[in-house]
Image: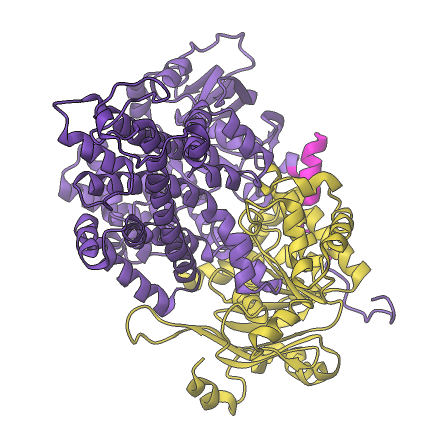
Chain colours: A yellow, B purple
Amino acid sequence: MTGTSQDGRSGTAFPSGPSDPTDGSGTARTHVADRDALLDVRDLRVSYPGRGWRAPRVRVLDGVSLWIRPGETLGLVGESGSGKSTIGRAVLGLVPVAGGTITFDGERVDNASRRRRRELSRDVQVVFQDPYTSLNPSLLIGDTLAEPLLAQGVSAREARGTVADLLDRVALPRDTVHRLPREFSGGQRQRVAIARALAISPRLIVCDEPVSALDLTTQRTVMDLLTDIQERTGVAYLFVSHDLSVVRAVSHRVAVIHRGAIVESGDADTVTREPEHPYTQRLLLSAPVADPDRQRERRAEYERRFHADAS
Amino acid sequence: MSAPAAEATAPRRSGTVRRFLTNPQAVLSCLVLLVIAGLVLFAPLVTQHDPNAAELSDAFGPPGGGHPLGFDSAGRDVWARLLYGGRNTLGGAALAVAVALVIGVPTGLAAGYHGGWFDSLASWWVNLVMALPAMVVLLASRAVLGSTVWVLMVVLGVLVAPSFFRLVRGTVAGMRGEPYVDAARVFGLRDSRIIARHVLVVVRAPIIIQVALVAGMAIGLQAGLEFLGIGSGSLPTWGAMLNEAFANIHREPLLMLWPGLALGVTSAALVLLASALRDVLEDRGTGPVTGRRARRAAADPPTTLEEAGERADLLSVRDLAVAYTLSDGTSTEVVHGVDLDVRRGEALGLVGQSGSGKTQTAFSVLGLLPEGGRVSRGSVLLDGTEVVGAAERTLRGLRGDTVAYVPQEPMSNLDPAFTVGDHLTEPLRSKLGLSRARARERALELLRQVEIPDPARVMASYPHQISGGMAQRVLIAGAISCDPDLLIADEPTTALDVTVQAEVLALLRGLQEERGMGVLLVTHNLGVVADLCDRVAVMREGRIVEVGATADLLTGPRDPYTRELLDAVLDDAPARAPWRPREVGTR
C-alpha cells in the first residue's frame, strides 16, 4: 500500500511477536523454515484506512511471523479483533499487505499480480466460518462445487465426475448436486464448503473458524473430517479459531495472537495445557469446563489471577 | 415484453417455473401479453387491410364486411391500424427498455462491484439524470432530433436507465462483502466470471420485475406524447389513434375506445405481471397466520392435569407444547410436552443443540413466541400466575418485576438511536413510576452493580460506542432493574469472547447469589452450565431427555443423548500429536 511504512520499518528487527521471549521455538525456526516450509509469513503488517478524512490508518497486524509445513495444521487462536482472520485473508490475497512477506512454496506471493494470484488459487483454498453465507444461495450445490474446477480450465464433463468424488469424500449423498444450499443443515453446508475447497487438490487450506457456527456434535464430526482428509491428501491447514480446545484437537502447532501480534507459539499440547504467556493463560482459564468441580477450581484460579488486578 | 420475461425464468430451477404456473395472476397477465404480442407481430396474417389506405367515402363507417371495428375519420380500417400501430407502440417501448438495460445494468454492476471513483461518478451522474423531468426532456429532444418515435424512445431509454442502475448497484453493493464472493475470488475466478455467475443470478429477479414496470411506463409516456400530437405524423400508433379519435369525440366517441382499450389492457397486464413476478421470483409465500387470529388461537385454556409431581414455587412448566402455523395453514409442533421447574434462587440450565426447542420453551415462559407460534397445550405457572392463555396485560405485569430476559445478541437488542441511559431509565419510569432524576440515579446504581467502571460515561454513550461485553452488562442491568424473581438468559455469552464470557458469568453468578434470583439459562455450552447452574435439563427434538443436579448429570449422564453431548465436549480431548513429515510419494 504505502511505500513509506514498508520502507521505514523493513530494516528494524521484529518489533513484537517473534522477538518475544515466549517465542523461543518461533524465532529460531523462521530460518529453518526456509527450506521445508510450505507457507512462510514474515513480519506481516496489515492496516486499514481510519475512519474520516486523513485519519491515521488502523493497524490490524503488527509484524506477524508464522510458517506451515506441508501436511501440517497450524492453529491460530485469538479473540475478536485480534487480527486472526486478517492473517488468513492476507494469505489468500483478499486484503492488501502493508509490509512484510508471504512466501508460498519458495515464491513470494504478497505482491503477486492478479493473474499469478488466480494461478495460485490452485494451491491455496479457503473454508469460511459461516456456512450460510459462504455458499451462493441461488446456485445448485453441483454448480458451486464445479466452480473452482471450471475456473482452472477443467472440462464440464470431467468436473461432474470430480464433484461426485468430492461428495463421497465429505460423506454427502451424490444427489446433493441437484439441490440448493437452503435445503441443508449447517453441518452439511460446511461439508459442501470443505468439498469445494478440496476440489482442485490444494496444498494449503485457510480454515477461518470453520466449526464455530456448528453444534457441538456436528463440530466434532467436521473436525474429524478435516483431520481425515489431511491424513489422506497431505494438505496443510491454517486453522483460525477463537476456541482453544478446538485448536488443540486439530492442530499440530498452535500460535496465539493478541492485538495483531503473535504472543506465543509452540506444539499444540504445550501451548494449550501449560501456556507461558499470561494472555494464553487467561484464554485457557476463562473457558469453562463441563465438570462442576474442575470448573470451580478453574474459576477460582481465574479470579485469583486476573480479577484482583482488573478491579 | 412478456416473452423475454417468461424465457428468463425458464433456466431457473423447476420450482420457479412451477410457482409461476400455479400463480393465476402471473399466468393470466402473461397470456394476455402473449396474445397482444402475437396479434401485433403477425398483423399481416390477421388482417389484409393496409393501415394507411384511406378511403374518404368510408370515413366513420360502421363495422362489418371484414372491418370488425369500422373506419376512422380518414376512412382507414381501425382494426388494421390498431394491429400495425401496436408494432410501433410496443416496439418503441421494447427499444426504450433495451436501451435502459444496456446502459443501466452494466454500469450498475461495475459501480456496485468495484465501488471507488467509478461508483461515485456514476451515482452523481445518475442523480443528475433522475432530477430531469422526463416529459420536458422528451419534448425538447423532439424539437432537436426530429419527431421519429424511435429516437424519442432511445431518449426515454436513457432517461429511465438510472432506475436499473440504482437497482443493480444497490443489490450488488450489498452482496460484495458476502463470503461466497470472496470464496469465488479465492477459487481464481476472474471478476467478469464472478459477476456473471454470482452477481447476475442475484440481480436477475429484480431486473425482470423492473423491466415489466418500465415497459408499462414507456408505453404510457409514449402514448401521452402522441396524444398531445407530438408523435411521428403518419406512423400509426395507439397514442396517435387516440389523438385523432379525440378530435372527433363528439362525432364518433367509439373510436376512442379501441386504442384506449389496447393501451389500458397492455399496461395493466404489464403491471400485474410485474407484481406476480415479484411473488414468484422472490419466493414470498403467504406468511404465517399472525395477529388477531394467531392470538386467539393461542388463548387455548391451560390443560388441567393430574399433578405430575410437586410444582416449584417460582416457575413451573407442565406438558408444554409449542406449535407453529405454517404458510399452508397446517401447524407443526416443535416442543412436545415439556416439564420444567425453577425454584427461588436456583439456576437451571436448559441445554440442547440448535433446533431442540430450548429457546421456544424459554420464549413461552415470557409469553413472547415469534409470529405464528403458540402454546398449543400445557401450563406455565410463573410465581403462581398462569401464563398460558393469559391476557397481554397480565403478561406485561409479570415481565420486568417477576421475570426478565437477557438475550443472546447484546448489540442487536439495543436501539442504536438511543443512549444506554435512555434504555435503562425508560422501563424504570414507566414500570416503577420513578421521576426522571430518580430513574437516572437508579440507572447509575445498576450500572455500578454490573461492574461497569465509568457508569456516567456509559450512560451517555450510544450502543455502537460500547463493546459487546459492555452491551451485555447493560442488558443485564436492564433485566435486573425492576428486581425480577426469575431471569431468563438465552445464550447470554455465546456472542462474546471467552474472556468476556468469564466476566459476564461471574457477574450473573454474583447477582444471582446476592439477590436470590432464579435463573433459567438457555445454552449449548456445557462448560457454562457447569459454571453457573445448580440443575440441568437436556433437551432434544422438543423433549426433555434428562434432568438432574449439574454435578450428577455432567459426571454420570444416564441418557445416551446426554452422553453423546458430553463426548463431543473437547475439554479432555487429547491434543494432536506433533507433525511428522509425510512419506514421499503420497501426493
B521 on left or right of A49: right
Q: Quadrant of residue A111?
A: bottom right
Q: Is residue B564 magenta?
A: yes
The foreground one among A31 and B261 is B261
State whether residue A234 is above or below residue B421: below
Place of residue B543 in the rendered image (x, y in percent of width and height, measured from the top left)? 60, 24
The answer, for residue B487, to whether it is visible in the render is no
User: Quarter of the image containing the C terminus of chain B?
Assistant: bottom right
The answer, for residue B78, to whether it is visible in the render is yes
- How many labels, in total? 0
Residue at position x 49%, y 74% from top?
A96
Place of residue B90 in the rendered image (x, y in percent of width and height, measured from the top left)? 36, 40
State whether residue A198 is above or below residue B426: below
The foreground one among A52 and B128 is B128
Residue at position x 26%, y 18% from top?
B62
Place of residue B511 in the rendered image (x, y in percent of width and height, measured from the top left)? 39, 42
Q: Is residue B126 magenta?
A: no
Range of residues picked out in magenta? B554-574
- Residue at the far left in the pictured view: B250
Residue at position x 50%, y 59% from top?
A304
Q: Quadrant of residue B92?
A: top left
The foreground one among B410 and A46 is A46
User: Quarter of the image containing the N terminus of chain B?
Assistant: top left
Q: Quadrant of residue A265?
A: bottom right
State whether residue A170 is above or below residue A204: above
Place of residue B30 in the rendered image (x, y in percent of width and height, measured from the top left)? 44, 30
B204 on left or right of B452: right
The foreground one among B562 and A156 is A156
- Residue at the far bottom in the pictured view: A11
